[in-house]
Amino acid sequence: MAAGSTPPYVVIGGGQAGFWAADTLRKADPDRECILLAAEPLPPHERPPLSKGYLLGRQSRDSLLFRAPDFYAAAGIDLRLSCPATAIDPDARTVTLADGTRLSYQAAMIATGARLRRLSVPGADLTGIHYLRSVTDADSLGQALRAAGRVAVIGGGFIGMEVAAAARELGCAVTVVEAEPRIMNRGAPAEISDAIAALHAAKGVTILTGRRVTGFAGDRAVAAVELDGHAALPCDLAVVGIGIQPETGLAEAAGIACRDGILVDAWGRTSAEAVFAAGDVARREDPGSGLSLRQEAFQNAQGQAVAAAKTMAGQPTPYLETPWLWSDQYDENVQIAGIPAADDRLILRGDPAARAFTVLHLRSGRLVAASVINTIREMRACRRLIEAGLRVPEDATEAELADPEVRLLDLTRRLKGR
């Protein structure tokens, strides 16, 4: 920073949240410099395709980029690749880089995302055990899948099932091992997970639920997965997808309040003055459910970062969007809006046998979430109804909600006129 110049905005993290924060800051305050610190060597890029199109070779590396490399200089964003931050000092308003450089800031955004959860079991260091978070991971896994016969996928969440679908499309024999009673147990109702399980079974995937991995066996390279203490599952490679953990190290070392994520308010503000956080690393109260949560989703990282960046730039903007995520497996599309809970009252629209239906989640008579499979057009209306606080029976009856002939879009129009 030149003598006499004003401090820049500093965004720590070059992922989804980091990119949208930097882009928004430059548009909201074009007269102030913005520095974007990316720990990875690749310019900011999308991660969702890594377990789908990119893994299958249907997308190029360039197609993952949010913008071409020359965009940043033209937009006035000082993008620094392979440049992780090692410390942040909220009192001095400085960020320290790995090379010892200290940057002063007007306001800082922590968008460090998350790191993979790793299995800590005997044999976990054998070659042939893959994790998927980065482009490099996807390149390595894709190459290995094309040479593999038998693949074990550890974890039946969204990423695990997407990798299973990709591996099957590449001709591998695939077995999924899930410790929970059903796949996608954390984020989807049983109707959705049962339909996806049936889809994978029809494609030839074996799914083992209620089984725990206790180790890996092999001589240097993995040859089998030990389940519940027994080497029961031979494999040529294993893919572990058991979730992520927020990268809160910088914030914790700076004394910023954290609890399985950096605690933020609706405006993205942390407990430290002029320090904000957004994306997978941030935990906030969801306005719809009142729950304190981290949302590990593409849409949340973008929307939360945009709102927080506007607030940083002097345009206070709360982030109030309904949580929303999606997953593509084979030719099927799953979407979930809101925060489903196990004790929600469920209303089914459509035909589960045809894998084209919507599940509406009611809590205390109010629509709080929706889960769909291949009824994509209904999701936009579902999100609007959740945000509008649709109540049963005041705004609609259960019979109306269950009838596929009743358009949910018409219900949104009715609510607008009440």
Image: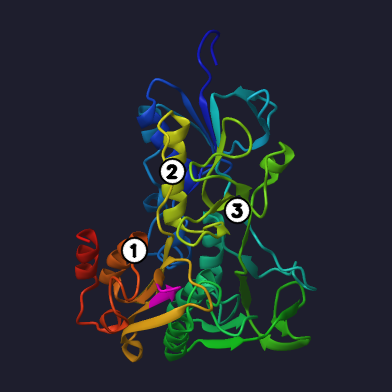
Residue type indicated by callout 1: Arg
Which tag is nearer the camera, tag 3 or tag 2? 2
Task: Write down the region rendered in magenta.
Answer: 360-365
Q: Quadrant of residue 402?
A: bottom left
**Residue linked to disc 3:** 114
Q: Is disc 2 placed on a helix, strand or loop?
A: loop
Measure the alpha-carbon separation of dots 3 and 1: 27 Å
At x 70%, y 27%, the residue is 100
Q: What's the magenta bit mostly, secondary-structure-wise? A: strand
Residue 48 in the figure: left or right of residue 89:
left
Q: Which mark is residue 318?
A: 2
Q: Is disc 1 placed on a helix, strand or loop?
A: helix
Residue type indicated by callout 3: Ala
Q: Quadrant of the N terminus?
A: top right
Instruction: Report if residue 70 is visible in the image.
Output: no
Q: Is disc 3 placed on a helix, strand or loop?
A: strand
Q: Which mark is residue 383?
A: 1
At x 29%, y 64%, the residue is 380
Residue 256 in the figure: left or right of residue 25:
right
Upstream in sequence: badge 2 or badge 1:
2
In the foreground, 342 or 108: 342
Residue type indicated by callout 2: Pro
